[in-house]
Image (cartoon, grey):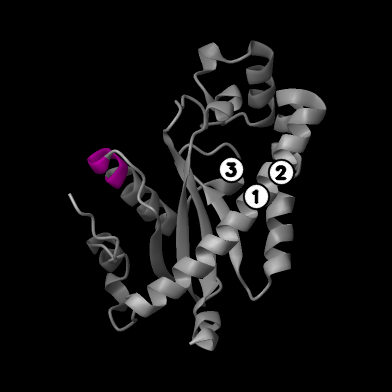
Amino acid sequence: MKINKLIIIPIASILLFSCAKQEDITVSLVEEMKVRDLGEKYATELLRTLKQNLMKAMNNGGPYNAIEFCSTKAQNLTKMVEEKIDHGIKLKRTSFKYRNPLNKPDKYEVEALKIFEKYYKEYGQLRPYYIQKVKEQDGKYYYRYYKPLVVKPLCLICHGEPEKMDRQLYAKIKEKYPEDKAVGYKPGDFRGVVRVSIPVKLLDKLQ
């Protein structure tokens, strides 16, 4: 079956904005292409930075050190990449099964995660990306680019089935994250997304 990759704002998005019908939240094909290129670039930059530092922590102290890194450094590194990119772009990793409460999804991210899950169930593969146009808490409009994340075998050391994980390691995870939800995965599972928020005004400058 040929799958049309054109991103169309779903009915759920329209309902979210039913009280503000005069506001244009549609995304044109030209806008989509520009958002896709920028979003993919910055999502990849964040993931590369996090992976490099995580592997360094693993090599220097194994999974226990990796947990320490994730709990104390990952958020700061995300901010560092944001500052490096500048232009008002904001980055976040989120999932329904989040580990750090700071990564809990907001209502727009919930919509995006549901779309990725539905696509994965229907087609057996991950949707390549998803785009929204939303008004965020600062009152400004942003395009949101979502890049899906997949579970790799190495991820299972800290995100696999609890009964199969090292007991002391799992105890450390629960100590750091008492309300942890990020376990029970298998290789190939949909893990969550990287969200790149791009100010609409920035995209206007590129047109």
Residue at 56% from the left image edge and 63% from the top image edge: 41
- Amino acid at dot 1: Arg
Q: Amino acid at mark 3?
A: Pro
- Report crowding for label 3: few under 14, some 14 to 19, many 20 or more residues within 10 A (C-alpha): few
User: Going by the image, does 190 lie left or right of 94?
Assistant: left
Q: Position of residue 82 (x, y in %)?
A: 68, 63
Q: Main secondary structure of the magenta part?
A: helix
Label 1 with label 3: CB-CB less than 8 Å: no
Along the line of sight, the residue nearer the viewer: 105 or 4: 4
Residue at image mark 1: 48
The residues tagged by marks 3 and 2 sit, at their Cα atoms, a distance apart of: 23 Å
Verify CB contact (< 8 Å) between mark 3 and mark 2.
Answer: no
- Residue 122 in the magenta stretch? The answer is yes
74 lies above or below 177: below
Q: Nearer the viewer, residue 40 or 171?
A: 40
Tell me which segment is drawn in magenta: 119-123
For mark 3, what is the residue? 101
Q: Do we see residue 25 in this rendering?
A: no
User: Looking at the image, is 58 positioned above or below residue 7?
Assistant: above
Q: Residue at x 46, y 28 (%)?
A: 187
Q: Check if mark 1's residue and mark 2's residue have beta carbons within 8 Å.
A: yes
Coordinates of residue 85 in the picture (x, y in percent): 68, 68
Residue at point 38%, 54% (across, down): 112
Disc with the residue nearer the chain's start (3 vs 2):
2
Decide if residue 182 is on the left or right side of residue 134: right
Q: Is residue 24 magenta?
A: no
- Local secondary structure at mark 2: helix
Q: How far apart, in angstroms, are the residues tagged by discs 1 and 3?
A: 22 Å
Q: Which mark is residue 152?
A: none
Q: Which residue is mark 2?
A: 52
Question: Where 100 falls versus 5 (above or below)?
Answer: above
Q: Secondary structure at mark 3?
A: helix
